[in-house]
Every structure is written in structure tokens, then in C-alpha cells.
Amino acid sequence: MAKTRKLSTYRAKRDFTKTAEPSGARKVARSARLRFVIQKHAARRLHYDFRLELDGVFKSWAVTRGPSLNPSDKRLAVEVEDHPLDYGDFEGTIPKGQYGGGTVMLWDRGYWIPEGDPHVGLRSGNLKFSLEGERLHGSFVLVRMANDRERGKRINWLLIKHRDEFAVEANGAAILDEKDTSVASGRTLKAIAEGKGRKPKPFMLQGGKVEADAVWDSRTGLAAEKRKADARGAKKKTNTLTAANLPDFIAPQLCETLARPPSGAGWLHEIKFDGYRIQMRILDG
């Protein structure tokens, strides 16, 4: 019920018989971490929609010139209505005449880590956080400005990069030009507008399954393919045993403790259950 109230403004602005934007009715895969997306939006004016998952919705801002990696740049971020979580997979064209009409690209996505209580940060107008995206990394802050009386109820914030290893001192917006394709489909804005290229790979929705980067499934992937190949090869072999000199000890691969698992599509994650592990060998049967 609370989620429905949060999305009432979002739904009131859109006619879902005309736009392909999600209504928020679809179930989104649960995640142990908070997700974020940045959508490049070629509407009446080009801007970047910045969305942070919180309390079952995306808190959203329209960043007029896009994020910058230079801490000296203060990017205007206009607060907009909460969006449903399945909007995090939306890439396509909003028809002319509809709210926000134009082309939408999934420019970046990943996880965000609040620095302190995010609810307190939003209320106080000083929301600090770190991003672990495919393109943006490191610490940022959203600072709320005083209401602009001439512009009515519009709530303006400033998006600012903190100084850290991911900050740059020169052209902080260069990444926007260097990375001009979708992280979900590899398409340009032009290709998306023309309906060309492959569909975006989902991030929020995984066909009703938990996120692919949250759980390891041994039935898929390289290990599964190798296991199937080994099984096919085993059928061709005889049961002849070959004598071999076994080493006294084989050093095992060891774990490394980190604050959080690495992000990126090249990693597989599984829960570690503590227990005993042994090496054994059989001699003379």
C-alpha cells in the first residue's frame, strides 16, 4: 500500500496504453544490496536520470548536464517523482506527447552504499554515498538547495563528486562522451530510437529468478559446460588404471577476506558455509 502511494504521482503522469514504460506492477528480483541506475534521456533537453533504490522504489533526480568526476563541478540535479524498480530495466522510446517523451538509454547501473542513514540524509538535504557501477565509482554527495521561489515547487539538489581515487581534476564530463553506448545493450541513442540492435540485458528483472550476480547456479556457466564435456569424454574411456607417483602435498587455493564481493559480470558468487575440508588419496585400492 505504501509503495502504491509512493508511485501515485509517477502513474498519474503516464498513459500506459501509449508508453512502454513499466507501471511498477512487475515483480523485481530481491537484492541484498541497494541498486542504482543512470539513464541517458534525450527528451526536450538531453539530461541524465539518476536513480537510487530505497524502500522499494527509485528515488530519482534529473541531472541536467550529467554526472562529473571533477569535485569542482556542481551538477544541478532536479528531484522528480519516485519511479518503480522495474524502471531500472527500461530502455527505449517514450512517444511524443507523453510525459518525458524521447529516447532512454541505460547509461550505467550497479550498487550504491549509503554513508550513514540514507533517510536522515534525504531529510537533511545532505545524502552521501558511494557508487559501484560499470562506469561510475567512488564517493558522491547530493546537497539540497533552497527552494527556488520563481520555479514553484521544484526541488533542486547539487550532485558533487568527492575527492578520492576515482576523481579527476580536468574534464570531469569526458566520461559522458567516451561512454556513449548502453551498458545493457551496447546500443547508441540513435540505434535505440530506430529500434535496432539487441534488447537490453535485464538487471532488476531476472525472469522471476534472483539476480544472476547474487547467486551461483552450478547448472550453468563454464563449470557446468566442462562437467558435461568431461562426462561425454568419460564414456569413451576404458576402466584401465594408470600408475602414477603422487606428491606428498598439494597446496590448496585459499580464501581472501574482503569488505564486499567484487562487482561485474565476470564473477560468480556463492554462500560460504564453514566446515572441514580435507585432501585424501587412495593407494593400493
Image (spheres, rainbow, N blue to C red):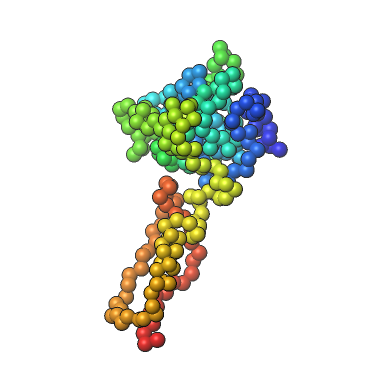
Q: Is 4 placed left or right of 216 in the picture? A: right
> Which residue shows up at 40% across the image and 68% down it?
233
Does residue 31 appear anywhere in the picture?
A: no
Extreme residue toward the top, this view: 150
- Residue located farthest toward the front when viewing the structure as drawn: 236
Left/right placement of residue 208 relative to residue 216 reads right
Image quarter of the C terminus: bottom left
Q: Quadrant of residue 243?
A: bottom left
Give how far across and how far down residue 234 sits, in percent.
41, 71
How many numbered tags mark residues here? 0
Spot the residue most to the bottom.
284
Question: At which x and y percent is residue 102?
Answer: 52, 23
Picture quarter containing residue 242? bottom left
Quadrant the N terminus occupies: top right
Q: In this orientation, which residue lies closer to the viewer: 170 or 181?
A: 181
Question: Which residue is found at the position 40% from the left and 50% from the top?
Answer: 266
Is residue 258 rendered to the left or right of residue 19?
left
Judge by depth and name the residue closer to the eye, 102 or 127. 102
249 lies above or below 139: below
Residue at the image position 34 percent from the left and 39 percent from the top: 165
Taking depth in this image into account, of 89 and 196 the one nearest to the observer is 196
Is residue 224 at least partly visible in the picture? Answer: yes
274 lies above or below 75: below
Position of residue 42 measured from the top left corner of the image (x, y, whole percent)? 48, 23
Residue 211, position as x, y percentages in the image: 53, 48
Farthest residue in the right direction? 1
**Could you tell me which residue is drawn at 42 percent across and 74 percent down?**
278
For residue 191, above or below residue 165 = above
